[in-house]
Image: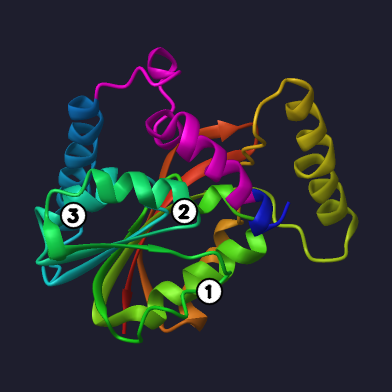
Amino acid sequence: MTLKDVQKTYEVYGKEDPLYAVLSRKDAKDTKWDTDEFFATGRQEIADAMRHLASLGIEVNKDRAMDFGCGVGRLTQALCEEFSEAVGVDISYSMIENAEKHNKFGDRCEYRVNTTDDLAQLNDDSFDFVYSNISLQHSPPEASSRYIAEFFRILRPGGVALFQIPSGPRHEPGLLGAKIYSIKRGPLRRFWKRIRRMPPVEIHYINQSLVEEIIKASGGRLIDATQQGSVRGSRISMLYCAIRD
């Protein structure tokens, strides 16, 4: 699966059922989300994130925040209630179009489409806080690894990254485990979902030890890695908190 595949999937969802694509609650499928309730979940999530940081003894400068994989802006809008400015970044044009329609904060909130495996359009040292939840897991691991590294480039010294991505067995490139993973998570899964007439939403992972290596190599310092629960089988959802030194 490539980033182009990811973009194609979310362009479809962004046009047909954008809120459900962001937060897939069974009773909200087929455009049944109540919009106010949907955005209220974003406010609750960011409030929980701020409490989590406080429990770790971390104070975040409340100037500028970035929401990676923002979708329709569920969390970006909530970040605007905590920070002076917030920028939402997503791979889908249709998602960003929806996000702009729901923006209640004017110029304090900015949305950008990013279709590459980097964040080159965002300047070095330009954010105090980077947040990402249930988003990195939908990109190929190679791209997600680069995005994590980019978080620390765009953070100001002392800035905080709080992001979620599943962890699972570590497969070294070129070895049998990596090849099996590629087949299972690629062509076979896409074929099955096409039979079911569903856009192929992939869920990938990066082994925790590799995530920690990326953080360190990118100038970050890991503060906490919290298990959030089982995703499937040996894969565990992890929430990482790290500070840029």
Q: Amino acid at mark 1?
A: Asp
Residue 8 located within the stretch drawn in magenta:
yes
> Mark 3 belongs to which amino acid?
Leu
The numbered mark, 1 or 2, whose residue comes first in the sequence reads: 2
Q: Nearer the viewer, residue 132 or 71?
A: 71
Please report contact status of discs 3 and 2: CB closer than 8 Å, yes or no. no
Q: Residue 219: which numbered mark, if any? A: none
* Amino acid residing under circle 2: Tyr
Q: Find disc 2 in the rendering and name its residue.
A: 93
Element under disc 1: loop
Which residue was labeled with disc 1? 118
**Residue at disc 2, secondary structure:** helix
Q: Is residue 58 visible?
A: no
Q: Going 87% across and 65% down the picture, which residue do you hit?
A: 174
The residue pinned by badge 3 equals 79
x, y percent for residue 232: 61, 31
Q: Are marks 1 and 3 in contact (CB under 8 Å)?
A: no
Residue depicted at x 9% and y 53%: 81
Q: Which residues are magenta?
A: 6-34
Vertical comparison of 110 with 96: above or below:
below
Q: Nearer the viewer, mark 3 or mark 2?
A: 2
Q: Residue 44 appears at what percent x and percent y?
A: 18, 37
Say if 243 sits above or below 100 in the image: below
Where is residue 114 drawn, in percent x and y?
48, 65
Residue 185, quarter of picture: top right
Distance between mark 3 and mark 2 Cα atoms: 21 Å
- Distance (Cα) linking label 1 and label 2: 17 Å
Secondary structure category for the residue under label 3: helix
Q: Position of residue 169 (x, y in %)?
A: 69, 50
What secondary structure characterizes most of the magenta part? helix
Q: Which is nearer the N-term, disc 3 or disc 2?
A: 3
